[in-house]
Image (cartoon, rainbow, N blue to C red):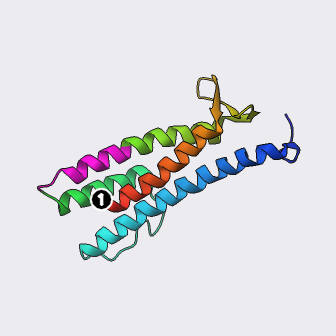
Amino acid sequence: MKPVSDYAPQDAALLCAVGRLVCAWTMLEQSLEAKIGLLREAMGDIRTVGARTRPSMAKLMTELRTMVAMRDRRNASALTEISAIERDMQRIDRFRSLIINGFQQPAEGGFTCRDGRNTQIHVSLDQLEIEIGSLDQLAQRLLAV
């Protein structure tokens, strides 16, 4: 096991991409909180999202689903979109958890991780970039609901 300072310059893009994945997830959380805040304001509720403790993504999605259901009682298309967004978020969250919890070392074209069953998995830099892009798209879809 080598220290982080010994990683080669070509690994810098990979390590930067991992950081971008973490940042993109945080930005998605912030987009969700902003959307809920806008819906609350439109409904006349002025309290802030997560005033005491930061709610989990599952709780935020539940609140969003509830508020949209109250807003669009006869239009199920928004709820269908929220369900699709939630499925995509869960898939990306599993990928994010694999990266954060299972990162092993840089490898040719990406890096290796170990999943919960201790299976070694190769993650390419391209795959990481696709998931970062997916997070950005999810944030836009959330704001559009």
Query: Who's the residue at 53% across and 44% down the image?
Result: 131
Instruction: Where is residue 67? Give x, y as percent.
Output: 25, 61
Quadrant of the image for the N terminus?
Answer: top right
Instruction: Where is residue 138? Give x, y as percent.
Output: 42, 52
- Residue farthest toward the left in the current orientation of the protein: 74
In magenta stretch: residue 85: yes
Report the residue marked by disc 1: 145
**Magenta region's main secondary structure?**
helix
Tell me which segment is drawn in magenta: 74-86
Q: Is residue 57 left or right of residue 15?
A: left
Q: Is residue 119 above or below residue 29?
A: above
Quarter holding residue 23: bottom right
Quadrant of the image for the C terminus?
Answer: bottom left
Query: Who's the residue at 36% across and 70% down the image?
Result: 37
Which amino acid lies under the numbered mark 1 shown in the image of this protein?
Answer: Val
**Crowding at mark 1 (Cα within 10 Å: few <14, some 14-19, many 20+):** some
Q: Is residue 137 above or below residue 95?
A: below
Instruction: Where is residue 2? Give x, y as percent.
Output: 86, 37
